[in-house]
Amino acid sequence: MSDVEKKDISSAGNGGNTPRRIFLKKSAAGAVITALPATSAWGACSVSGAMSGNLSSFSRHECEIPPIVGGRSPGAWKNIRKMCHAIFVNSGAKDSPRNKCYRNYVNEFIDTTSMDLNSLFTGPSDNLRAALESNGGADGSLEFNLAGVYLNSYFGLYNIDNANNHEVASALVNSIILYLVTEANQGRAATFNFNFDVSNTSTTYELLECSALSTVKP
């Protein structure tokens, strides 16, 4: 997927209400347009501070870029039936009983799990399935990428020690949102490169309920 060129950050009024800042993000998935309230509405560059409602003022003028390196692309997670054996090294051969067990689990997880995105995000849904189906429109391109980050974190592709930890995965995607928000509100180009590794990243994450099943395709 090719990058999309950044456009100038601009401000736009909305009928006399609080001005909203609009920016385009350059990412592997394409352009993302997000409307944000003016600077005075936002708080410190911390997930805990923002999620607790501490949005009165900036405590810092710069946020660190969340470290996202590797992990499978959102498209790989969306196509888990084909990619399961490549992502989960313990899932066995493609279409083996164990592999089917893994991908059924992951599909159900995607259908029923929300990322608990901060209210700074203006997308229509933070459900993983909705996010993976949203690529290509407005905030959809951003939530599409965030879904990939969440799944990579939850299933241990970034760090196996953080597997099965919703709080860590949610905090990571929210830190990306906060980074983009604070950059935009400081008048800087709000960009983020997700750096997904589309071919080589896998996880040793193990589903105990699938472990007794055969790894060989019938």
Image: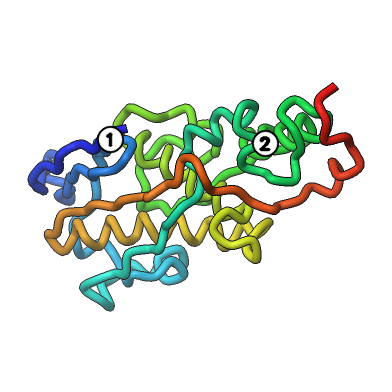
Q: How is the image coloured?
A: rainbow
| x, y percent for residue 179 | 31, 61
Identify the residue under disc 2: 85
Query: Of callouts 1 and 2, which one flags the residue occurring earlier in the amino acid sequence?
Result: 1
Question: What amino acid type should be assigned to the residue bearing mark 2?
Answer: His
102 relative to 1 in the view: left or right: right
Q: Which part of the image, by quadrant, shows the C terminus? A: top right
The tag on residue 120 is: none
Disc tally is 2
Viewer-proximal residue among 1 and 173: 1
SS for dot 1: loop
Question: What amino acid type should be assigned to the residue bearing mark 1?
Answer: Gly
Rounded to the nearest angstrom, the CA distance separating label 1 from label 2 is 28 Å
Question: Dot 1 surroundings within 10 Å: few (below 14), some, or many (20 or more)?
Answer: many
| x, y percent for residue 154 | 61, 53
Question: Residue at the spot x=32%, y=72% of the render?
Answer: 44
Viewer-proximal residue among 136 and 209: 209
Most extreme residue toward the right is 212
Q: Which part of the image, by quadrant, shows the N terminus? A: top left
Residue 59 versus residue 43 in the image, above or below: below
